[in-house]
Image (cartoon, grey):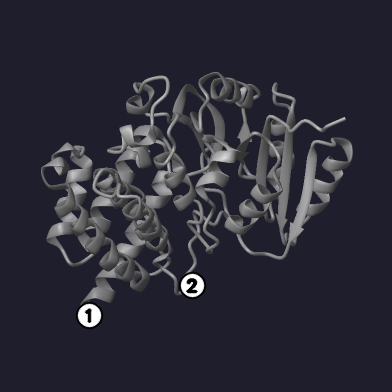
Amino acid sequence: MAVTAPKVSVIIPVYNVERYLGECLGSVLGQTLRDIEVVCVDDGSTDGSLGILRNIASGDRRVKVLTQANAGAGAARNRGLREASGDYVFFCDPDDWCGRTMLKRMYRRAVRLKCDVVLAGAYRHDAVCSVPYAAYPSKRLAAMPDVFPGIDAADFLFTDARANPWNKLVRRAYLAERGIWFQEQLRVNDLYFSCIAVAEAQRVSVVNDAFYHYRIGRPGSLQDNVRSDGRPLLWLCAFEAVRSRLERDGALQTFSLGLLRLLLGTGCRDMVKQADAASIACHYRQLRREIVDFLAMCGERAGCLKDFERREADMVRNSDSPLPLAVFLARHYLARSAGRGTGASAAFARRLAVLRCKLSAFLCGGV
């Protein structure tokens, strides 16, 4: 008898998350969509994560455990994708968790509308003060037709669909046909995958509800703790890969405003996450070149930017120093943390305030 492929493969890269892994896997295995496989790739964990995976797999044959030497989340996700057999794939981070009906709701929509990608909303959980707030999908995406090609939302797709894989159910054959994989670099290994997967999709749909629970500000999280590793331009390397692929496809001009928004959003935030003033200055120089380039490419269309985005753009265009932008962002995130009660925003602003002092001393010495 032929073995039927599972409806969805959930791929989870695992590295030293023993504290959160049980909750994550419990939420995935407890999905109301039962016909799934869970591909867990242990990326050389040094804590008890692998033991937890093997224990859970022994009690549920839907769980497949793979191991590899530490190579990063991008390499682990690619390994999982190569081993996956489901019609659709979903990427879950090992310190997050999922609402019980998430996969069923997303899969049903995908099958009914013959989608390449289905997007859904998420909750952000601040690990500092445990305050969740709903985020995504945006009103602009929710207002799109039931099915649309990614290019129809080009002006806001990358920011509104998020440069993360965990809010997307993606048809596995589509990824293989288009040759879409994760970059295997230390950080920001998911931006290329997430942007290209939605940009090239011919059939995208949005479930206007939030299911995924994303933990931010966790101690030890790579996204929130950028070390001074001599590689401050990893976000920009990922961005350049997105730019190059869209240019190859003849779609760069069409997506130029969306790419500008991505630079002003995630690009500026990654600058702030750098571990020292020299890295911030290095990141800013390249970021500024990209922003000025895309402002010129967008021309009058840059007038569609939101007020906050325009203020960022003006600040970057008019200053060869990162200091004004750092001060502006610090004030913004302090105000946002006061309004939302989110400790992560406040911590982000405090980090900026410290770096502002370092930047002032560093720039006085000459960049």
Label drawn at residue 229: 2
Which residue is labeled 1 in the image?
Answer: 366
Does 50 sit above or below residue 9? below
Does 114 sit above or below residue 169? above
Q: Quadrant of the C terminus?
A: bottom left
- Nearest the viewer among 283 and 198 is 198
Q: Amino acid at mark 1?
A: Gly
Position of residue 209 measured from the top left corner of the image (x, y, whole percent): 49, 22
Q: Quick check: can you spot residue 235?
A: yes
Does 65 sit above or below residue 144? below
Position of residue 193 measured from the top left corner of the image (x, y, whole percent): 49, 49
- Nearest the viewer among 333 and 59 is 59
N-terminal of the pair, mark 2 or mark 1, is: 2
Residue name at image x 81 percent, y 47 percent:
52
Verify CB contact (< 8 Å) between mark 2 and mark 1.
Answer: no
Q: Amino acid at mark 2?
A: Asp
